[in-house]
Image (cartoon, coloured by chain):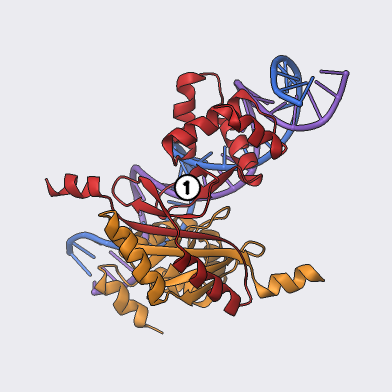
Chain colours: A orange, B red, C purple, D blue
DNA sequence: CTGGTTGCAAAATTTTTGCACTGGT
DNA sequence: ACCAGTGCAAAAATTTTGCAACCAG
């Protein structure tokens, strides 16, 4: 539960209650927008300001603690930095789910970058569609 | 040059000079942000308003004439809708280049979606890194 | 003609910033 | 105790909206 403290310190960021709260909210939600984070954080820490959420997201993305997941037609979501994966993004409800990014895609994209003498640093693979839950709901 | 007119009409949008101008700017630039489009459009049509650019981007994305390309840490770019491809995004200069999206990735992502009973509608594959030009510039 | 489109200005949203105060290390 | 981090409020930036005039079909 307090593993965040070490993570933050490793990255040269102070382990404040605000940051810990933001991180645990994101972990619980998986992926969240700025205002989803703010809303959620308010429940347990009503004095935390929106400006602080913004400042910390900027800081933590900058230090590689968080990753921005920009989504077509919606607001960016943020997730904890973890091993490479792809996103299933539901165009109905906006939910994002992670799936492993297999070696096939890894190899393939590596070659494409290589052929363009492009120094590959990161991949973002997003699949847009309708999740099982929304498909059921739409059918009814 | 006037092929845009038909394209727009097919989608139920009137072929105004404003839209034609916006489309030709995007074609020329490949990928552009809202304000890049606005700046560029002003050169040949100084009376075109920013609100019109926004309204038309919304309309043309909605009708599938344009596609939004959301980019981590930067503003979204817009491109003409064309066959599936991936993006090489330079983290230094922000330039975006297209590359074909080969069958390997297509098949692989299709299977991943299928296994999650996710109704796949579209893919967005973005590779982040440093382009050849910026790598050279950085070395000097 | 006439309904969609434009331009302008105003409003709403979203994000950033300045600065005094606070709290982590 | 020092300096990064916080909170508030104000500012900046971005995007949306209302409405009268306009123009493509």
Q: Residues within 10 Å of mark 1 (few under 14, many from 20)?
A: some
Query: Residue B31: x, y in percent?
Result: 44, 42
Q: Residue at x 45, y 59 (%)?
A: B101
Q: Is A99 on the left or on the right of B54, as rendered?
A: left
Query: Residue C10: x, y in percent?
Result: 64, 29
Question: Could you tell me which secondary element the residue under label 1 belongs to?
Answer: loop
Query: Residue B131: x, y in percent?
Result: 27, 50
Nearer to the camera, A74 or A38: A74
Which residue is labeled 1 in the image?
A: B76
Q: Within the image, what quadrant is residue A8 found in? A: bottom left
Q: Is A112 on the left or on the right of A52, as rendered?
A: left
* Vertical relation: A136 (above or below) A120: below
Q: Residue at x 43, y 74 (%)?
A: A101
Nearer to the camera, C9 or B47: B47
Query: Residue B99: x, y in percent?
Result: 40, 53
Q: Quadrant of the N terminus of chain A?
A: bottom left
Q: Residue at x 55, y 46 (%)?
A: B81
């Amino acid at each position: 539960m307090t593993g965040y403290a070490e993570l933050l310190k490793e990255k040269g960021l102070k382990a404040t209650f605000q940051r810990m709260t933001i991180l645990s909210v994101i972990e619980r939600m998986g992926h969240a927008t700025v205002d989803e984070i703010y809303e959620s954080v308010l429940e347990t820490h009503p004095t935390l300001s929106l400006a602080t959420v913004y400042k910390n997201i900027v800081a933590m993305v900058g230090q590689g603690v968080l990753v921005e997941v920009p989504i077509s037609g919606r607001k960016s979501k943020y997730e904890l930095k973890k091993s490479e994966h792809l996103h299933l993004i539901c165009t109905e409800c906006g939910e994002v789910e992670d799936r492993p990014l297999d070696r096939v895609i890894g190899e393939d994209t590596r070659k494409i970058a290589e052929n363009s003498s492009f120094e590959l640093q990161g991949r973002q693979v997003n699949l847009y569609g309708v999740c099982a839950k929304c498909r059921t709901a739409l059918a009814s």
